[in-house]
Structure formats: structure tokens, C-alpha cells
Image: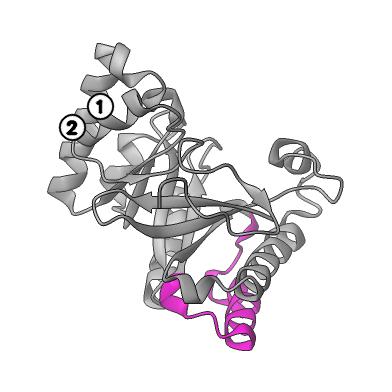
Amino acid sequence: MAFQPIVDVAQRTLFAYEALVRGADGAGAGTVLARVDATNRYAFDQACRVKAIKLAAALGLPATGARLSINFLPAAVYHPEHCLRATLRASRATGMPLDRLMFEATENEPIQDPAHLLDIFSEYRRHGFLSAIDDFGAGYAGLSLLAKFQPDILKIDMELTRDVHARPVSRTIVGAIVQVCRTLGITVVAEGVETVEELDTLRDLGITLFQGYLFGRPQVGALPRPVGF
């Protein structure tokens, strides 16, 4: 697992660390996920959750005040309450507070059964976990998913944030997403922020939570301190 910080620039605090899967040889997430299919999806999803929790706890994440953000595969969750057993055991064993856990479902995969995803998020919320939709704006579901379920966190994909200061259309779309989320009580994170110009524009649009190389690259087996914090 590699970890990348998500920062709150208004409070100048760490909001979370996202756990990102890596191969034993250092291969990126895309290479690893390409080897996941219906035969190993459940085992892979469970192993990633447990590994992320145990490693983050060992690295001292609870003491930082940050949350731990874990990606999950909705298709790997057959029965939400049963699939959480390993997660809950790992949290109890390591002392990781349940209210520090955040689960992200990516919008980059087709959501075959929206009702199932809503059941998953409802069960997670019952345990005190934060829910997040990742890669919003560049995936399959978009506003149709948001109309059915309002997550705690919405992460705007880097396809919209990249060079947003020089792209009026992207700036308008991001601004509209922020306004919708504000009305619905959803917290927004801007992903893939790499330049001060992007940061300043997104801050002007009302975003205060950021993730990207401007603040820190993912580091394997470490909790990198964000640049400037």
C-alpha cells in the first residue's frame, strides 16, 4: 500500500490519507487491478482493506488526526454486513477508530446495480464510516447516481481539475458541482491538483479539500507529510 495525503487548506490540517494498492514489485494500481477478475475479486478486496488498516495503524495514522480512505470494489461486496467482518476485526485489533474510516467507490467502473451500491453505503454509514464517490465527472454514473444517493464526500476527477484556471468550461462545470454539493450537504475534494494556479482557481470556487502532487505524492509504506504543512 502507498498512502497519499488529502489536505484541508482552510484549516491547514490533514483530512485523510488515501490507501492506494501497489504490487510487491512496486507496480502501479492499474497493473495490479488488471489482474483482478470475478474469480479473485472478493479475496482481493478483503485483503486490501485489511492491509490498509493494519499498515496505517502501524504507521501511526490515528495519532495524526487524519482519516483513512479505502477504495473498494462494489462488485466484490455480496452482502454488505458479511463483507465488513474482516474490516471490523482489523479495526478492533489495531485500535483504528471506525469513525476514521472512509470508503470510496470509483465512478470509473460501470455500476451494474445502483440499488446494491446504495445498500452498501447505507450499511457502511450505519457503522459510522464516511462514504465517498471517487473520480466524479469522468465516469459512468454522474448526476444520476448523485440523485439516488448523497455521499458524505465527492471527489472531483482530475480530468476536470487539470488546468482548470485556463479552461473556462471546466471551471464552470466544477463551480456548478460545488454549488450542488453545498446545497446537498456534501463535502467536495478536488483531485489531481498539481499547480498553484489550479489550487487558487479551485479555492475561489469554494473548495478547501485537495489531493494531488502539489501537496504530496503517494509513498509506499509511509504517511508522507504534506508539502507546506
User: What whole-number distance in Å separates the C-alpha atoms at marks 1 and 2?
Assistant: 5 Å
Residue 28 screen position, x and y as percent:
73, 39
Q: Nearer the viewer, residue 173 or 42?
A: 173
Q: Is residue 124 above or below residue 191?
A: below
Q: Nearer the viewer, residue 152 or 150?
A: 152
Residue 121 screen position, x and y as percent:
42, 62
Residue drawn where x is 71% and y is 36% of the image: 30
Magenta stretch, main secondary structure class: helix
Residue drawn where x is 70% and y is 41% of the image: 29
Identify which amino acid the numbered label 2 is placed on.
Asp
For disc 2, the marked residue is 204
Q: Is residue 112 above or below residue 198?
A: below
Q: Quadrant of residue 165?
A: top left
For disc 1, the marked residue is 201
- Residue that sits furthest to the left in the current view: 183
Residue 63 screen position, x and y as percent:
48, 76
Q: Residues within 10 Å of mark 2 (few under 14, many from 20)?
A: few
Can residue 77 be found in the magenta stretch? Answer: yes
Residue 149 screen position, x and y as percent:
31, 52
